[in-house]
Image (tube, helix red, strand yellow):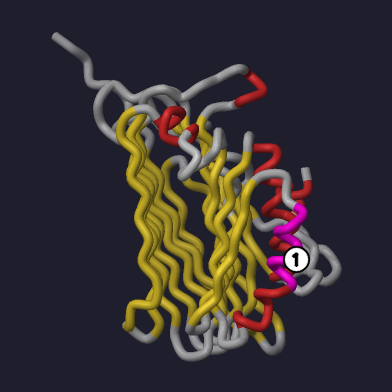
Amino acid sequence: MAVPLARARGRLNLAFKRRGAETVLDVLFQEGCAKARFPRQEAGALAGAVLLNTAGGLTGGDRLIQSVRWGDGTAATVAGQAAERIYRSLGEAAVITTRLAVEAGATAEWLPQETILFDRARLDRDLQIDLHGDAEFLGVEAIVFGRTAMGETVRQGVLRDAWRIRRDGRLLYADALAVDGDPAAALDRPGLGRGARAVATLLFVAPAAAALIDPLRAALAEVQGLAGASAWNGLLVARFAAPDGAALRRDLISALGVLRAGRPLPRVWQC
């Protein structure tokens, strides 16, 4: 009789609130492999949390559910402790579901590190963001198809990656990426990646987002990979494609320096 394989399960619920002029922790619930840590704040940095997956990665059938809420007037950064790894699946997809809520007057930064897909990995990832009033949001999601430095090539895999952003219930932004088959062959095509093995989306939502488009484009002119940015209706979106994860990280750090008004990046991004 076949023994069912053990599956990783993680659930995290995190919330911030104002206490006087400070942003402090309001709610913390963590279960299974999903954990949060709260490193000491650097001078000039926002309050924040670092999320980690103690399972060391995800594979088929694993599930990670995480939610974060920024209360009225708060300002905080939520980052990832390390790259998330998605390993080969025997059939099912790994599932990552993220819900972010940002109340009026709040400044939210969602800065997970890259997700690395290994050959024959399957991932279904869904990110939903609800903004209220004049809330500001800065977020990034990066995907690396195999570790180039290790000679890895992803020739088979399935990825479903969806974003939805709403302000006061009205849809502002919707994006979906679907890969099924040979990611390397698709990324080799001139119209898609020109040989890239790492891609990312960087999104800034704020009433004054368009004012940063020229400085951002100036920074993107110096990137190692390919990058472009557009701004409309209080949204600024930048796309990146790079030959490997290291080049992608350097390009993202350059862009984040423009959008974060000189604030220091979380230490996990500085390694």
Count of numbered labels shown in the rendering: 1
Q: Classify residue 18 as left or right of residue 268.
A: left
Q: Residue at x 68, y 46 (%)?
A: 249
Dividing the picture into quadrants, the one containing residue 124 is top left
Q: Which residue is mark 1?
A: 218
Dominant SS in magenta: helix
Dividing the picture into quadrants, the one containing residue 128 is bottom left
Q: Classify residue 250 as left or right of residue 90.
A: right
Q: Residue furthest left?
A: 1
Residue type, mark 1 in image = Ala
Span shown in magenta: 215-222
Dividing the picture into quadrants, the one containing residue 229 is bottom right
Q: Residue at x 33, y 83 (%)?
A: 170
From the top left corner, tell me how far across and down residue 264 is, in percent. 80, 63
Q: Residue at x 36, y 66 (%)?
A: 174
- SS for dot 1: helix
Q: Nearer the viewer, residue 223 or 121?
A: 223
Above or below for 205 versus 93: below
Q: Nearer the viewer, residue 121 or 26?
A: 121
**Quarter the C terminus occupies:** top right
From the top left corner, tell me how far across and down residue 15 is, in percent. 51, 70
Whether residue 26 is visible here, answered yes or no, is yes
217 magenta-colored: yes
